[in-house]
Image (cartoon, coloured by chain):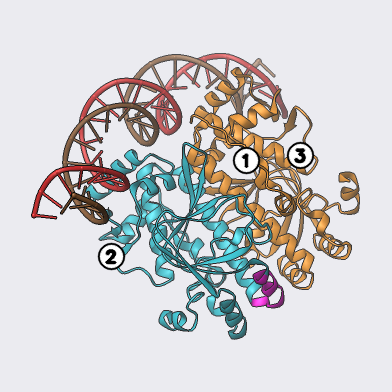
Chain colours: A orange, B cyan, C brown, D red
Amino acid sequence: MTILNQTLYPATGRFLLGRGRELLGREPADAFEDLFSRTQRRGAGEMIARRNTPHNQATLLVEGFAVRSVTDGRSRSIVGICVPGDIIDLSALGFATLDHDLVALGPVLLACGDRAALENLAESERDVAQALWTASQLETALQRQWTIKLGRLKAARRVARLLSELWCRLDLVGLAEPGRFAIPITQQDMADMCGTTAIHMNRALGDLRREGLVEVRRGLVTAPDRTALERYGDFTPAYLSGPQALRRTVTPEREYHIMM
Amino acid sequence: MTILNQTLYPATGRFLLGRGRELLGREPADAFEDLFSRTQRRGAGEMIARRNTPHNQATLLVEGFAVRSVTDGRSRSIVGICVPGDIIDLSALGFATLDHDLVALGPVLLACGDRAALENLAESERDVAQALWTASQLETALQRQWTIKLGRLKAARRVARLLSELWCRLDLVGLAEPGRFAIPITQQDMADMCGTTAIHMNRALGDLRREGLVEVRRGLVTAPDRTALERYGDFTPAYLSGPQALRRTVTPEREYHIMM
DNA sequence: CGTTGAATTGACACCGTTCAACGACAGTGG
DNA sequence: CCACTGTCGTTGAACGGTGTCAATTCAACG
């Protein structure tokens, strides 16, 4: 399934995979794929798009990771992370600029199309419009979860949740193994995503390692018991599941009671 | 202008006001208004919609305030706040459930329509689809700003930013005066929005009051120098402005350098 | 083998939480 | 009118999480 997608749709094969991709008709899917014809590579740390500057393309992340970053001269906040399959500049659709920078976390492969062309396609192809709406809603849900993560949890639990989320998203696009996954991320990066400092992040990760919950070493995240990690981070994956899963049933919530 | 809107469109008159409302054609605007035919009132603290339960309506907040709340038994996080003119359950469009509770902050007036009917209207009326997209994008941008607020600022600056944001949003829909605005909010509420405790929020507000930056007393927010408040909260309103403003020019950023 | 960026550790100050108690105020019912 | 009551706001003190500065170790790479 994943393999098939990747062959038929080298650029867009992972877009919404596991979250509504299958609702795209054949024709719209082809037109969508054709749109992202130009590919680009960027190296680690390179800027992909700058905030508050005219942005007239649509960009799909094919391989690698990117972060949404907001800098104010002395500090950097990372407000989101993109994994393969994500359209990373969705929020420029209809707005013409981004309110944050997009930066490659490691080496990345991008597929780029014309922003206006995508907007046009969405108007003529109902399935595409629907897919974009779903993607946008998922992005909002993710952002809300990051807000919760920062508002409610202490540093160690924040990382636990961050890693759980990443793991889950990589699973959806077929890029995680049981027991571990890879991502070229530094402790400074994780700190910026969790609203803390690199030094404190180091101690938090040390705690998690000593507890046997998770180990992060040179781009490899390893956890013997994934469920335990998710529980520690108070993570529930429901919000990632997309419309059809949510439509299907109302799963009774797992309600954890967690000391911050 | 505002008055006119409110007369012609009692339910939807404030929707996207100042952020693209004028791009709605006459006919779609009328159809949109007709959709929100049922009105409802709720008292302070009452639940408007519950998370993870089937949600088949579209709800527009006409008067009053509501919060997006996530509870886990012992703690409550408020991940967003709704002001008049907001469609408060946008994230149920295409998903059929919300991932958070909606709770009235004070007494509210709601205008309700059928979710499916709105989805249909969006498919037939391009302007409506466009407006919903804009609204959704604005919501995402707001959520990103909340993430930044929590990740980067200390408690006192968080409230300052929160109040600045509210003031700005109320301005857009014509509900703020120079020097002050009203909102029925407790210190506990503000604490839950800022990821801190009511006690610490009390001290933070005390500091802000002593600094002469802002005073919050019994639902009335007063600030002699609004710019100073915004600067203290490191607040820039660009992200609220909507598509046309962003399209127009790239304003050089105000870059503040702030000690957390 | 020296260089570089990342990870690690210790000491100390500060922000924020927690528990406890008290004060201010509005609404209610006698 | 006043006592009662509940909610909200306010304050103090002890404790723990986090930020900051400085120094050291480690791994990768030319």
Residue under label 1, please give it: A253
**Marks 3 and 2, how far apart at CA:** 51 Å
The answer to whether residue A243 is seen in the rendering is yes
Q: Secondary structure at mark 3?
A: helix
Q: Which mark is residue B179?
A: 2
N-term-proximal mark, 1 vs 3: 3
Q: Position of residue B9 (x, y in %)?
A: 50, 80
The stretch drawn in magenta includes residue B172: no
Classed neighbour count for the residue bearing mark 3: other residues with Cα under 10 Å, few (<14), some (14–19), many (≥20): some
Q: Is B16 drawn above or below residue A26 in the view shown?
A: below
State which quarter of the image contains the C terminus of chain B.
top left
Question: Within the magenta stretch, is there residue B126?
Answer: yes
Q: Nearer the viewer, residue B154 or A22?
A: A22
Q: Which residues are magenta?
A: B117-127
Disc 2, SS: loop
Residue B131: image x %, image y %? 60, 71
Instruction: Give me the disc on residue A171.
Output: 3
Chain letter for the residue marked with disc 3 in the picture:
A
- Depth check, mark 2 against mark 1: the one in front is 1
Q: Residue at x 80, y 54 (%)?
A: A21
Chief secondary structure of the magenta span? helix
Task: Tell me residue A103's x, y (percent).
Answer: 64, 47
